Image (cartoon, helix red, strand yellow):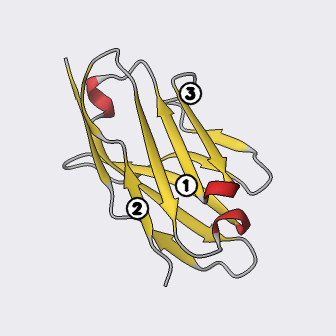
Amino acid sequence: QVQLVESGGGLVQAGGSLRLSCAASGNIFSISTMYWFRQAPGKQRELVATITTSGSTNYADSVKGRFTISRDNGKNTGYLQMNSLKPEDTAVYSCRLIIDETNQRYWGQGTQVTVSS
């Protein structure tokens, strides 16, 4: 059974940095597109960043230039480097994998990121 485990969240002051990790069990990571979502209290879930199996990336306008998504297929792990954090980045961040050929989808449990002003 595939499991995704996020880590790296926490409390940070505005302007600080955090790096989130998403570790996948099983042998699906290298054949999957990875997504990072976030959801703040009372708000809709937002797609933050995407990285394809070929390494192409895409970002929400709200995080462009501050966040970097990456992947290490050898470690079955994806990352979201978050710099210049703002209070409005406060949310639960979750990773998602979708296997390109089968469209099977997997979610992590989420990790809380809190940015204080």
Q: Quadrant of the C terminus?
A: top left
Q: Position of residue 104 (x, y in %)?
A: 60, 80
Label 1 amino acid?
Answer: Tyr
Q: Nearer the viewer, mark 2 or mark 1?
A: 2
Q: Which mark is residue 106?
A: none
Label 3 amino acid?
Answer: Lys
Q: On screen, 91 above or below 62?
A: below
Report helix, strand or loop for mark 1. strand
Q: Which mark is residue 35?
A: 1
Q: Residue placed at 19% from the left, 50% from the top?
A: 42
Q: Residues within 10 Å of mark 1 (few under 14, many from 20)?
A: many
Q: On screen, 59 above or below 74?
A: above
Relative depth, front residue between 75 and 3: 75
Q: Position of residue 90 (x, y in %)?
A: 27, 36
Q: CA distance from mark 2 to mark 3?
A: 25 Å
Relative depth, front residue between 46 and 83: 83
Q: Nearer the viewer, mark 2 or mark 3?
A: 2
Residue linked to disc 3: 64
